[in-house]
Structures are given as structure tokens and as C-alpha cells.
């Protein structure tokens, strides 16, 4: 049996109209260049995506299809594929052909120079403004929370070597974030410039809420910095409150210069009340994630796996 050099894991959501063309372009880009496999993970699609994947998997020995029982999120779907891949290198790419299969070999050749991960750095993002802003904010947060090297763009299109994949799949929490896990494992990263393609058809599944979800995974899933910030903010607020107390007592007893009314108490209540609620919210987010982790909330549930001439389980 030939050794597989590149595994390509692609999470699929409502992309029935694109899957055939995506496979054709991968076939053209890689056929005869390296031995590869493609793992399509159907993440609870509501269209005919799974039927398309099954047809491809039964017709091509290079394709494996995984069907999840419900939509579990992109990173969870990726883990499902990563745990069965066999390649010496793993490519992660989206299902909408905005990531050009022709660039896979460019990522592969760069990664083979000794890097653990090589990211695709898009020269110009062909995305809506919300996604651009969300990517920028999450990138800055990654620099603060998990020491992301400056200048590295955390692209969803990347290649990872086998030893790093073996470490990533050990993650057992219910809220995986692949880039966050990578940055806690290694700083041996590279990137290559590639063109970002327009989506082949349909509209993007990316929403503002998904950007917030990624932000919260990073914010509370891979660092205790938010808790430390909450503690620091609490200390600063206490010092500010103490200074105000001294000032008001001085004005009241010494200068007799004070304003009658409720303005000051109301301002202080709003300020400190908001601060307390924000801090409690951060702590509650950590506690909630700990609760779900301790209760073994599954990352995903697989209903079916199909390969050529192999019925699923």
C-alpha cells in the first residue's frame, strides 16, 4: 500500500453545488504529483452535500466521507477528519473554492523546509467587511493571549506536519479552536502568499455570530489572561473608588464644596455595577466551559463513514 503524503480535510456545509468542481480542481492540481487522500466532513448540511460526498467516495479510492449527526462547528468537524487521516502532511481548506487547490503544493513545499505549520497568506481577502474585521480582531487577540507571532495570518487554509497533527488531535475539550491549539503547541510557523478566490456559488456561511464564537473560544479556551485582566481591572476600580472616597470626604468636611443630589451615587453604582457584572460574566464563561468539559460534552457524533467499496458504520 502506498504511503499517503498529503491528507486534505474539508468541512462541508451546504455546498452541494461546489463539491464536484472542488474535487475536480484538486484532482487536476495533485494527480501524479503526490499520493493524497481527501476527507470530506459533512457538518450537518441541509442540502444534498452528503449524497454528493457519498457518490464521490464510492467512485474514487482517494476519497473518504464522514457524516456528522448534527452541525458541530467547523473546528469540531476538522477534528473528526484529522483523527482518521493517514498523510504525512495535513491540508485544511474550505469547501467554497476560495482556497485554490493549485496552492496546496506551494504550502507543502514550504512546510517541508522544516516547519510544523505553513499558513496561506491571502494577498487580498475577497470577503465582506464583517469577516475582515472579525479576522483582524481575532488575530490581535491571538497575539495577546497565545503569543501568535506578529505578521502571521491565521488563515483557514494551511498545511500541518504529521507530528503536530498527532498533538492537535489529543485535544478533548468540547470547544476546539484549531489555530489556538496550534499556537499552544508550536511557534515553528511559516506562511506563503496566495491569491484568495471569489466563492464559486452561493453565499458565505460566515456570520457575525461565528466571529464572536471564535473570539470566545480564543478568549476563554486557551488562556487565563482574561481572568487576570478582570482581577487587574477590579484592583484599579477599587483604587479609583478609594481616591473618589477621599475626595468626596475632603469636599464634604473641609471645603464644604459638594453638590446635593444623586448624580455621584448613580454614576458610581452604574460604573461599579457594570464592572462587577462583566467580571462575573467572564468567570461564568470559564465555569460553564469547565462544567461541559467535566460532563464530557462530545465534540461531534459520527453517523456514517463511506469509502470506495466500503459501507459505513
Image: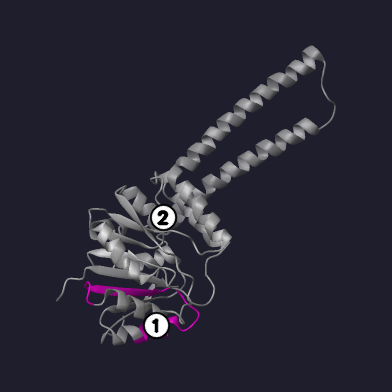
Indicate the position of residue 115 as horizontal and vertical percent values.
26, 53
Is residue 59 placed above or below 156 in the rendered structure?
below
Residue 8 position, x and y percent, is 31, 70
Q: Give the residue at mark 2.
A: 154
Position of the C terminus, as image quadrant, is bottom left
Residue 200 in the figure: left or right of residue 81: right
User: Counting residues from the N terminus, which is met first, the one under dot 1 or under dot 2?
Assistant: 1
Residue in view at x 29 percent, y 59 percent:
160
Q: Name the residue: 25% across, 77% down.
A: 31
Q: Which residue is at the far top?
A: 254
The number of numbered discs placed on residues in the rendered structure image is: 2
Q: Is residue 85 visible?
A: no
**Residue 40 in which image quadrant:** bottom left
Q: Is residue 50 left or right of residue 166?
A: right
Q: Residues within 10 Å of mark 2 (few under 14, many from 20)?
A: many
Q: Which residues are magenta?
A: 32-55
Q: Is residue 122 visible?
A: yes
- Reading the image, the residue beneath label 1 is 20
Image quadrant of residue 207? bottom right
Q: Is residue 220 left or right of residue 23?
A: right
133 inside magenta stretch: no
Q: CA distance from mark 1 to mark 2?
A: 27 Å
Q: Residue 227: x percent and y percent?
A: 49, 40
Identified at 27% across, 63% down, the residue is 108
Q: Is residue 294 above or below residue 12?
A: above
Relative image position of residue 161 (x, y in whole percent): 26, 59
Q: Nearer the viewer, residue 117 or 294?
A: 117
Amino acid at each position: 500500500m502506498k504511503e499517503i503524503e498529503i491528507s486534505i480535510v474539508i468541512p462541508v456545509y451546504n455546498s452541494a453545488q461546489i463539491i464536484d468542481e472542488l474535487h475536480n480542481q484538486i484532482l487536476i492540481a495533485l494527480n501524479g504529483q503526490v499520493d493524497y487522500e481527501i476527507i470530506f466532513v459533512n457538518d450537518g448540511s441541509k442540502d444534498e452535500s452528503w449524497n454528493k460526498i457519498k457518490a464521490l467516495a464510492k467512485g474514487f479510492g482517494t476519497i473518504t466521507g464522514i457524516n456528522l449527526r448534527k452541525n458541530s462547528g467547523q473546528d469540531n468537524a476538522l477534528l473528526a477528519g484529522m483523527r482518521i487521516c493517514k498523510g504525512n502532511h495535513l491540508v485544511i481548506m474550505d469547501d467554497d473554492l476560495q482556497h485554490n487547490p493549485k496552492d496546496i503544493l506551494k504550502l507543502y513545499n514550504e512546510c517541508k523546509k522544516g516547519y510544523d505549520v505553513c499558513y496561506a497568506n491571502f494577498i487580498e481577502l475577497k470577503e465582506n467587511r464583517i469577516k475582515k474585521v472579525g479576522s483582524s480582531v481575532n488575530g490581535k487577540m491571538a497575539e495577546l493571549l497565545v503569543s501568535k507571532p506578529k505578521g502571521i495570518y491565521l488563515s483557514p487554509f494551511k498545511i500541518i506536519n504529521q507530528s503536530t497533527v498527532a498533538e492537535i488531535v489529543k485535544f478533548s475539550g468540547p470547544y476546539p479552536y484549531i489555530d489556538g491549539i496550534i499556537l499552544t503547541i508550536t511557534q515553528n510557523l511559516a506562511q506563503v502568499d496566495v491569491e484568495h478566490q471569489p466563492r464559486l456559488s452561493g453565499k458565505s456561511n460566515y456570520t457575525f455570530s461565528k466571529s464572536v464564537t471564535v473570539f470566545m473560544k480564543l478568549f476563554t479556551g486557551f488562556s487565563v489572561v482574561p481572568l487576570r485582566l478582570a482581577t487587574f481591572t477590579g484592583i484599579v476600580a477599587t483604587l479609583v473608588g478609594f481616591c473618589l472616597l477621599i475626595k468626596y470626604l475632603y469636599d464634604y468636611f473641609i471645603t464644604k464644596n459638594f453638590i446635593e443630589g444623586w448624580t455621584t451615587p448613580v454614576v458610581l453604582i452604574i460604573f461599579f455595577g457594570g464592572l462587577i457584572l462583566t467580571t462575573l460574566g467572564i468567570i461564568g464563561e470559564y465555569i460553564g466551559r469547565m462544567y461541559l468539559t467535566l460532563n464530557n460534552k462530545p465534540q461531534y457524533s459520527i453517523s456514517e463513514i463511506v469509502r470506495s467499496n466500503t459501507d459505513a458504520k
